[in-house]
Amino acid sequence: MTTTRETAARPVDVPSIAAAPDETAWRRRHLLDLDDFTPEEVGLVLTTTAAMKEVLAREVPRVPALRGTTIVTLFYENSTRTRSSFELAGKVLGADVINVAASSSSVTKGESLIDTVRTLQAIGADVIVMRHSRSGAPYLAARHTTAAVVNAGDGLHAHPTQALLDLYTMRARLGDVRGRRIVIVGDVLHSRVARSNMWLLTALGAELVVCAPPTLLPRGLGDAPGDRLPPVRVETDLDVAIRDADVVMALRMQNERMQGGFVPGVREYSRRYQVNEERLARARPGAIVMHPGPMNEGVEISHEVAHGLRSQVEEQVANGVAVRMAVLWLTTRVAGGSAA
Ligand code: CP
């Protein structure tokens, strides 16, 4: 029988993480968005994630790959999944991880974003993982620090690591997403997850269908010239959109961003847009259901579907740790973090 002590004393095969994928495909110091990602870069994240899954499957899932690297999670908005998975990802790789919540930092005394980022750099941050309610905030931060900036969700704009973990989860169940029909349904207007998934999945050849009431669809969505979002099929009727779907991704009704009376009421919204068993009968037999979380069960997704056999919600969360390990590993290669 292998004891924990014996396992911990094994030589740590950090080089296998480094050597497996072709890291020369990665040139980014920051990870801010996926709108200009090449398929090679996506492939590198996926293969690195697979290597990280192997680390996580060990009896003692710890390697010193990022020993000597300091990661700061800087969150101006609440989070359960993203913040905790970045923290765990950093710790598994041996980094020092410092968590800063804006609500309990000197931001409350009026400190600017730029001053906060410079302060974190001064204490030795190699990577700043940042969530902010304002679209573009991580771009501003990246211009004012030598640390690598990883966007953990900015306003309505982007949530790149969520889309990468969504892709990893889809591929684990369905294989290549090329030609697969993927339906994203819900509050698309306020969803940075939807935007990042649109860029990523269309770049890989998936057939994307976006479904919402007209009031919850962003302007510029479709295939008109000059649109700032990739071309996708738009449907306002979920019963039509869901037909022959391979993946159905429900989005959270973002009550905190809903001041404009976008829908007549939650009950009416659920009646027309809830992902439930009855509607899923129109999807392909092996179709899977996803949700980035947190879920409003009984609103955008039924309790039965959220916890049913098709649901990948827990797999998404679990894969988030490995994807974030991959992203931290790759960005520190370029940032010149003091990784082993
Ligand atoms: N999906 C997601 O970003 O969840 P959290 O807000 O809990 O991080």
Image (tube, rainbow, N blue to C red):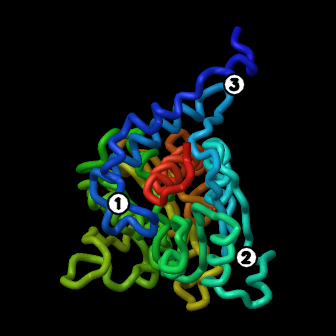
Let me know if residue 313 appears in the view: no
Work out whether residue 106 or residue 42 is closer to the camera in this orientation and state it.
106
Tell me how far mark 2 sits from mark 3, CA to CA.
36 Å
* Type of the residue with mark 1: Leu
* Mark 1 crowdedness (10 Å alpha carbons): few <14, some 14-19, many ≥20: many
Work out whether residue 33 or residue 330 is closer to the camera in this orientation and state it.
330
**Which residue is denoted by mark 2 in the rendering?**
102
For marks 2 and 3, the one nearer the N-term is 3
Q: Is residue 144 above or below residue 246?
A: below
For marks 2 and 1, the one nearer the N-term is 2
**Mark 2, secondary structure of its residue:** helix
Q: Quadrant of ligand 1?
A: bottom right
Q: Which mark is residue 200?
A: 1
- Depth check, mark 2 against mark 1: the one in front is 2
- Residue 280 location, x and y as percent? 44, 51
State whether label 1 is within 8 Å of ligand 1.
Answer: no
- Depth check, mark 1 against mark 3: the one in front is 3
**Which residue is denoted by mark 3 in the rendering?**
8
Q: Quadrant of the N terminus?
A: top right
- Depth check, mark 2 against mark 3: the one in front is 3
Tell me how far mark 2 sits from mark 1, CA to CA.
30 Å
